Image (tube, rainbow, N blue to C red):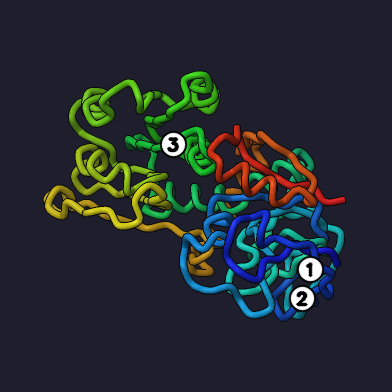
Amino acid sequence: MRAHVYHTFGAAADVLRAEDRPRPSPERGEVLVRLRTSGLNPHDTKRRSGWLGGAVRAGGQIPHSDGAGDIAGLGPDVTGRAIGQRVMVFGAGHGRIGGTAADYVSVPAQFTIPLPATCSFEQAAALGVPAITAAHAVLSGGPVADRWVLIHGGLGAVGRAAVDIAVWSGARVIATHGTPARAGDLTALGAHHILDRHACDIAAEVARITGGHGADLIVDVDFGANVAIDAACIAIGGRIAAYSATSNRTPVLPYYDFALKGAVLQFVQATLLSPEASRAAAAIVSARLAAGGLQPSIGHALPLSEIAEGHSLLESGTAKGKIIFVLD
């Protein structure tokens, strides 16, 4: 099969190469998926560049966690999946060599979600880990109906999914953004209050909107940048679900600002969820897909042969919406 692989960390154009690889065979509890699309996440570029540390696995790494395609094979003990079934793939490549930048991938069946006819392979590739992250961040702490939920970066892939799931779950949603021209997307998703992070004091606005109560839940795209805002905004007994800290890997934590509110700080990594938590998040994503929710914003659909260009585009900060790759 065709696959794109890197053997060392570095710039995308320098290290990503097309190779012929044996088609994987599904092991116990796994399914083999013939991929039609592959999705790109910031985690993928951080891993490939070496930003996350660690080492490249012996034999090289096929990147990308997310994708979509048709089930082409079933390992022993797989139930609830069938040959030819259309599925979303999330978390591929975690703990193994094979990601979705290839013709085929073998993954645990629980890392696939059957797709309704209304969800295209392109849309599914743009969801994956971001949707699972959002589902766990919003609902793993319990129901959010009638609770105040602050979502930083509401226009991002995780942010959009978090707004969708929080609104669907009955929360009162405050979403922030940094792109006024696209603020209408958040209105369409159902956010009740929309804040431009460049044009207002977020902590003051959250206090005003909530009548001084604060946010019961904060879903944070960049904890390193927002730690002081989160400390000011979080309600007594509230929870902060942080899934990245790109701007500052080692933020200083104002301990008592959080501790004196009894706040819970939760770090969310979709590929590290327990089997039970992963299944719960997948069930939420499946329910939203069946209802026509979780509509991603796809900005760039490129052939997989342009994988290096896609990685560079994401790292440039100029991409508008999700980047996905289409396989022949």
In terms of sequence position, does the residue under pointer 2 or pointer 1 come before the other? Answer: 2
Residue at the spot x=63%, y=59% of the render?
65
Q: CA distance from mark 3 to mark 1?
A: 34 Å
Query: Disc 2 marks which amino acid?
Result: Pro
Q: Are marks 2 and 1 in contact (CB under 8 Å)?
A: yes
Query: Disc 3 marks which amino acid?
Result: Gly
Specify whether residue 310 is in view: yes
Residue 49: x %, y % from top left: 55, 59
Disc 2 target residue: 26
Disc 1 target residue: 32
Query: Disc 1 marks which amino acid?
Result: Leu
Q: Quadrant of the N terminus?
A: bottom right
Q: Is residue 217 rendered to the left or right of residue 91?
A: left
Q: CA distance from mark 3 to mark 2?
A: 37 Å
Task: Count neighbours of disc 1 (C-alpha within 10 A) and say few if under 14, some if 14 to 19, many if 20 or more.
Answer: many
Secondary element type, mark 2? loop
Placement of 125 over or under 211, stated as above or below? below
Residue at the spot x=71%, y=65% of the render?
5
Identify the image quadrant of residue 193. top left
Secondary element type, mark 1? strand
Identify the image quadrant of residue 219. top left
Q: Is residue 178 rendered to the left or right of residue 315?
A: left
Residue 292: x %, y % from top left: 66, 36
Residue 153: give its label.
3
Specify whether residue 108 is in view: no
In terms of sequence position, does the residue under pointer 3 or pointer 1 come before the other? Answer: 1
